[in-house]
Image (cartoon, helix red, strand yellow):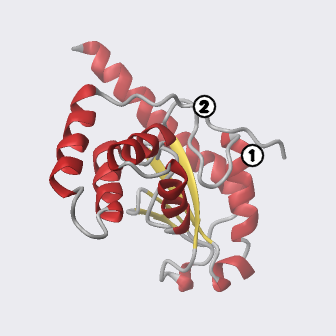
């Protein structure tokens, strides 16, 4: 399987930067301020792109490597954007034994991205996760944390993804009507 890195450009706005700068100015002198600042940045931007990490480092007067080290150590931080449709595939024991790896591989093949990445159009991102608490439905895939697909077979994945593509097509058609 060929690995294709997502190439979504960073599109931060001046308003987002001003909001982050105000938060940094308010908290920069507090002990242990780096994590809360990074959390606020992720809330503002939706993830922590390298441009934002460098900006935080410059504003705090610390090496960018320190910010990057924190961002990569803690799983709460996302280094790439999330898609409109965030696909999570459970790789917990029950799901794995019943074929979730094959489901995940099929999704990656169809979307041409790997877990942790986002499609270039910003529609889909994939995460491999541990137990989602639905072992009786193994293997399980979720979309946006609310649409649950259980007892899933790899052969069913393409039709599920196409359903969300169809939603997008219908939404665009509706927008164009008005």
List x then y, in percent, for residue 171: 35, 29
Q: Determine crowd level at label 2: few under 14, some 14-19, many 20+ residues with C-alpha closer than 10 A.
A: few
List x then y, in percent, for residue 109: 74, 46
- Mark closer to the observer (1, 2): 2
- Farthest right residue? 1
Side of 44 relative to 109 (left or right):
left
Secondary element at image label 1 = helix
Residue at coordinates 41% horizontally, 41% vertically from top-left? 52
Q: Quadrant of residue 35?
A: bottom left
Side of 110 relative to 20 (left or right):
right
Secondary element at image label 2 = loop
Residue at coordinates 68% horizontally, 39% vertically from top-left? 5
**Label 1 sits on residue:** 109
**Label 2 sits on residue:** 7
Residue in the foreground of this view, choosing between 37 and 141: 37
Query: Vertically, is 116 above or below 16?
Result: below
List x then y, in percent, for residue 48: 44, 48
Residue in the foreground of this view, choosing between 145 and 130: 130
> Could you tell me how many numbered marks the image carries?
2
Residue in the foreground of this view, choosing between 25 and 131: 25
**Residue 141: image tag:** none
- Give the mark nearer the N terminus: 1 vs 2: 2
Q: Quadrant of residue 13?
A: top left
Q: Quadrant of residue 94?
A: bottom right
Do the residues under discs 1 and 2 have CB atoms within 8 angstroms? no
């Amino acid at each position: 399987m060929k690995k294709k890195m997502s190439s979504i450009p960073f599109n931060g706005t001046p308003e987002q930067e001003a909001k982050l700068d105000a938060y940094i100015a308010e908290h920069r002198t507090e002990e242990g301020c780096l994590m809360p600042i990074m959390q606020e940045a992720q809330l503002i931007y939706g993830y922590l792109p390298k441009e934002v990490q460098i900006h935080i480092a410059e504003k705090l007067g610390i090496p960018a490597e320190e910010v990057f080290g924190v961002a990569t150590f803690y799983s709460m931080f996302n280094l790439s954007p999330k898609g409109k449709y965030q696909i999570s595939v459970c790789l917990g024991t029950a799901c794995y034994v019943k074929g979730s790896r094959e489901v995940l591989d099929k999704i990656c093949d169809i979307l041409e991205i790997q877990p942790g990445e986002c499609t270039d159009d910003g529609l889909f991102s994939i995460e491999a996760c541990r137990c989602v608490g639905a072992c009786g439905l193994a293997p399980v895939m979720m979309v946006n944390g609310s649409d649950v697909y259980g007892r899933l077979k790899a052969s069913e994945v393409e039709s599920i993804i196409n359903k969300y593509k169809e939603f997008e097509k219908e939404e665009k058609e509706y927008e164009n009507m008005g």
